[in-house]
Amino acid sequence: MEDKEQKEKKNLNTGNIGTTNSGGYRQGRGGRFDKKRQPRRFEKEEKEFDEKVIQVSRVSKKTKGGNKIGFSVLMVVGDKKGRVGVGLGKGPDVSSSIRKGVNSAKRRLLTVPMKDGTVPYEINLKHGAAEVMLKPAPKGTGVIAGGPVRAVVEAAGIKDIVSKIKGTRNKASNVYATFEALKNLKEMRERREDIKVYQIKK
């Protein structure tokens, strides 16, 4: 009996017998668990912006050593709260091109003027070969728009709008035309506000 008690005391002094932590796991030397470790819990980070791929193009460039293959990706990002951006990313693979396109779009963010979930004015804009029409709509109408226009207005957070593509069917051209139309809406609103201020001062 005495030998057994001495051995237990010796083990306690040397740390061979594991101790129990707050989680109920026995912990031995070096802080390692005798049982399986608890799984790590990773919290899912919420993205500030929604990202949409509009067009992926494969680009081939003639070089001295042969053909150099690359990709260009047109991206639309928006927070659905009035901010939207369009960017083009180029790289040797699709993933790096998407990342560059997102960064480019975030640098060109535009705050879109909205009134009751729709645009404040009707606008027709021609941008190169593309021509788009954006028209305000009553609540409950929804987004009546083609693919490229829909991607931009939904990313901006516009809930009710009527639009029409009148020119080319090229996706990139229509995305840029829609972005320019929203930019012109902002300028129109600023000009009208300046006129109102001028009339009040006068």
Image: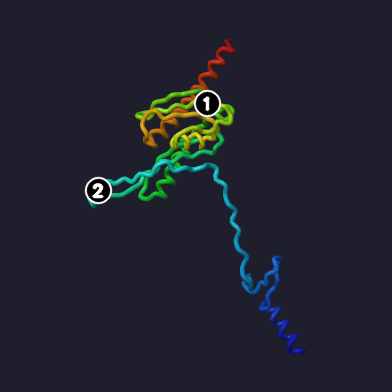
Instruction: Give the amino acid at mark 2.
Output: Thr
Give the labeled residue for mark 2: 63
Q: Give the side of residue 18 with respect to residue 197, left or right.
A: right
**Up-down relation of residue 134 to residue 23 (above or below):** above
Q: Give the side of residue 100 with respect to residue 120, left or right.
A: left
Q: Residue furthest top?
A: 202
Residue 108 lies, in percent from the top left, at: 46, 35
Residue drawn at x 31%, y 45% is 59
Residue 201 lies, in percent from the top left, at: 58, 12
Cα distance in 3D space between marks 1 and 2: 50 Å
Disc on res. 44:
none
Residue drawn at x 48%, y 40% is 77
Give the labeled residue for mark 1: 136
Pointer 1 with pointer 2, Cβ within 8 A = no
Q: Nearer the viewer, residue 52 or 36?
A: 52
Residue drawn at x 52%, y 35% is 156
**Up-down relation of residue 172 to residue 199 (above or below):** below
The secondary structure type at the circle numbered 1 is strand
Residue 74 lies, in percent from the top left, at: 41, 41
The C terminus sits in image quarter: top right
Q: Nearer the viewer, residue 36 or 32?
A: 36
Q: Residue furthest left?
A: 64
The N terminus sits in image quarter: bottom right
* Mark 2, other Cα within 10 Å: few <14 / some 14–19 / many ≥20: few
Q: Residue furthest right?
A: 1
Residue 95 lies, in percent from the top left, at: 42, 50
* Mark 1, other Cα within 10 Å: few <14 / some 14–19 / many ≥20: many
Q: Nearer the viewer, residue 59 or 92?
A: 59
